Amino acid sequence: MAGVNETTAAGTRVADAVCERLREMIFTGELPAGARLSVPALAERLEVSRSPVRDAVLRLVQERLASEEPRRGAVVAHVGAAELVAIYEVREVLEGLAARLAVENAGRRLVRALQEALDDHEAATRTADLAASTEADLRFHRLIREACGNAEVVRLLDDVQTQVRLAMRTTTVTSGPRQALDDHRAILTAIDAGDATAAEQAARAHIFRLRALLQQQAEVGV
Amino acid sequence: MAGVNETTAAGTRVADAVCERLREMIFTGELPAGARLSVPALAERLEVSRSPVRDAVLRLVQERLASEEPRRGAVVAHVGAAELVAIYEVREVLEGLAARLAVENAGRRLVRALQEALDDHEAATRTADLAASTEADLRFHRLIREACGNAEVVRLLDDVQTQVRLAMRTTTVTSGPRQALDDHRAILTAIDAGDATAAEQAARAHIFRLRALLQQQAEVGV
DNA sequence: TGCTGCATAATTGCATGTAAAATCCCGGGC
DNA sequence: GCCCGGGATTTTACATGCAATTATGCAGCA
């Protein structure tokens, strides 16, 4: 029942399924930050042998969802407020770059998709639908980075998002939804106008404000 | 003889030694881009069993020194001109960020170390000592990123440098040494003046020019 | 109660066996 | 000459065994 009961799709390795399952367990909190990732224990729990579990845990370490010390095993990584701030400093310039490149590479279709995400976001905020609001927010950012035409940027921002998700499990971060909407509108306006520099500035300003909020909340938390 | 003849230091795993040895083989060209990383063959060559070799190859894949397709093994990654340009777009904003943070965090000691690196770079350029010139160049950039106080930035720029080194094995990139010196002087001047914005701009402009050179050479190559 | 030291148990990291799949080699057909 | 198909060979990915190391539990002592 608790096994890796995936429909073994073509070319699927057990290690991939285990890795995905472990990610899920981490993000749902089933494996909280600091939990030991014992290979034999997980192998029994997931009803597979130790080899694919070992591979999966090593991958999680590489992805920094887990941290390890040699000969002492791996534990679910803990992303603290300080690390999150550092990540947001990086995110600021990467989102700025993505917005600039998106203007240079993309066309009307992007603008329409962004407008739609923004409308959904607005509607979800009005009805206080947190899940839909978060989804539309994430979609807005994903549309921009996937339109930027730079695979490195996409990969790095995906990593950033993963780390942020992990941090959310321990650090509470409530970004003001109204501010985010205003920021997104400014970004869309710049992209719509074809102004790459303005888009970069607006995207950076957006993340800058989120980071300021983070730091503020971290200080209160301390 | 060809084995992993490391002095097995405390806490050292065989897999670590193998990973380091494989990196070395990749960067020296002993394993050229596209070469298959056959686990049994490497295990025999390095005189270890297949397990640590497997772990090492998986890590190289995660580091993107190798690429793999499921069930078809891994090969040494090939970083083409297009990928390198994408990497330099990212590098531009990251070096800019590092320079800005360095101004905000560091003090006189950084300025002195940078001045020294710049002097060495200048001297090496005058005597046409390519190795010393490259070393001083790399040192200048390393000093800045390690002074920035953001572990994420350091890690990402280290990754960038690794990818660039890998690309150098296939793509020839000769950056104009005089331009680099001028750029570095401008960066140092801004840092010395404590002007974070100017430092960010100067660092970005430096990488921007390197990227323009890359694109130019790539076009000639095509 | 709280700490120390030892025996037990569990885990890590490496070695090796194996089925299924991919690659390679080579002769035959067009 | 060039492409296709079939069998031998290699390789991958998983399973499992094992020694060294580390964590754990527990008795004894202050």
Image (cartoon, coloured by chain):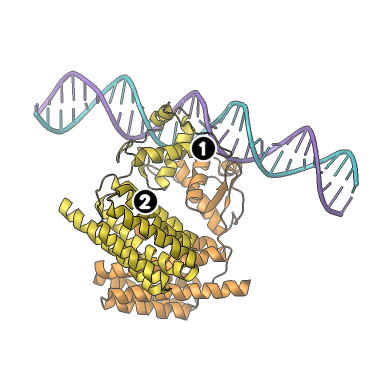
Chain colours: A orange, B yellow, C purple, D cyan
Tell me the quarter of the picture where residue A169 sits: bottom right
- Residue A162 visible to an observer of this rendering: no
Residue visible at 52% across and 54% down in the picture: A65
Tell me the quarter of the picture where residue A140 sits: bottom left
Contact check, label 1 and label 2, Cβ < 8 Å: no
Residue where numbered disc 2 is placed: B135
Residue visible at 52% across and 46% down in the picture: A57
- Residue A191 visible to an observer of this rendering: yes
Tell me the quarter of the picture where residue B194 sits: bottom left
Residue A97 locus on image (x, y percent):
34, 67
Residue A117 locus on image (x, y percent):
37, 72
What amino acid is at disc 2? Glu
Residue visible at 49% across and 68% down in the picture: B105
Residue A220 locus on image (x, y percent):
61, 75
- Above or below, A179 against A92 in this view is below
Residue where numbered disc 1 is placed: A51
What amino acid is at disc 1? Ser
What number of labels is visible? 2
**Residue A60 circle label:** none
- Above or below, B36 against A30 in this view is above
* Chain name for mark 1: A
